[in-house]
Amino acid sequence: MSNEQPKIPQATAKRLPLYYRFLKNLHASGKLRVSSAELSEAVKVDSATIRRDFSYFGALGKKGYGYNVSYLLSFFRKTLDQDEITEVALVGVGNLGTAFLNYNFMKNNNTQIVMAFDVDEAKVGTEVGGVPVYHLDELEERLNERITVAILTVPAQVAQPITDRLVRKGIKGILNFTPARLNVPGHIRVHHIDLAIELQSLVYFLKNYPAE
Ligand code: ATP
């Protein structure tokens, strides 16, 4: 495999962690190859999309053989930077923030929440899921250049000023769980997950477009 990373479309890139997780399990169970039909069934993505996605990785499945599991795995590991841990900070140790700290993502990939911030004196100075909780006043002094991603689980009205501080401190990506729409400079990536809207949209689709 060459060190040149091909340019992958964003929609494909978003499916990579899904493929990666499944292939890791396959590999662990000793499977050497997998067909696009099997993958499709497991990750619930249609097989034409899988074939197109995989063609970007230079993985051309052979008819009647499928894809080589180790080849795909090493590609994904490289592409997703799985050999390197991405350090993450979380701001807002409420119900949702606490759940993330306890979960801490390490089972599925190499991202790890290494510190959290809150303004509630009862939470500051404690550890949640093994992660230290600092006062928001210490944000600038605690963040360091290894931490490039932040998760926001604060009340919506404080999301923007906290975002501005994170951006000034060099955070590159924000996973925003607040309903606030954030303004950020062009070089910052924000992924917005509004759980209330997702739930509402699921209910709407169930009512209007029931699954076959
Ligand atoms: P959720 O379920 O959304 O996490 P919650 O009901 O537990 O919320 P919220 O009022 O949404 O609590 O607050 C989430 C967390 O954010 C709380 O722990 C709160 O102390 C913290 N918080 C509030 N304001 C700030 C702030 N300016 N900076 C950092 N944390 C804050």
Image (spheres, grey):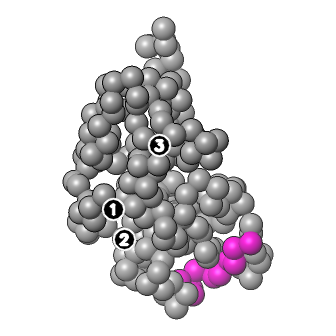
Residue at x-position 74% and y-position 72% = 130
Spatial separation of the CA atoms under disc 1 and disc 2: 6 Å
SS type, badge 3: helix
Which callout, 2 or 3, points at the residue further toward the start of the chain? 3
Instruction: Look at the image and say whether residue 70 sits in the magenta stretch.
Output: no
* Quarter that holds the N terminus: bottom left
On the image, the x and y values in percent for residue 156 come to 50, 58
| Residue 172: mark | 2
Does the beta carbon at disc 3 come under 8 Å from ligand 1?
no
Q: Nearer the viewer, residue 63 or 48?
A: 63
Contact between labelled residues 2 and 1, with CB atoms less than 8 Å apart: yes
Separation of residues labelled 2 and 3 (CA atoms): 32 Å
User: Residue 187: percent from the left, percent from the top?
Assistant: 25, 68
Q: Position of residue 212 (x, y in %)?
A: 48, 8
Secondary element under disc 2, as helix, strand or loop, is loop
State the CA–CA distance, disc 1 to disc 3: 31 Å
Q: Give the residue number, with chain letter if any, for mark 3.
A: 69
Magenta range: 130-139
| Residue 136 inside the magenta-drawn segment | yes
Q: For residue 4, what is the image quadrant?
A: bottom left
Please give the name of the residue rendered at 54% of the width and 33% of the height, measured from the top-left corner. Answer: 199
The residue under label 1 is: 189
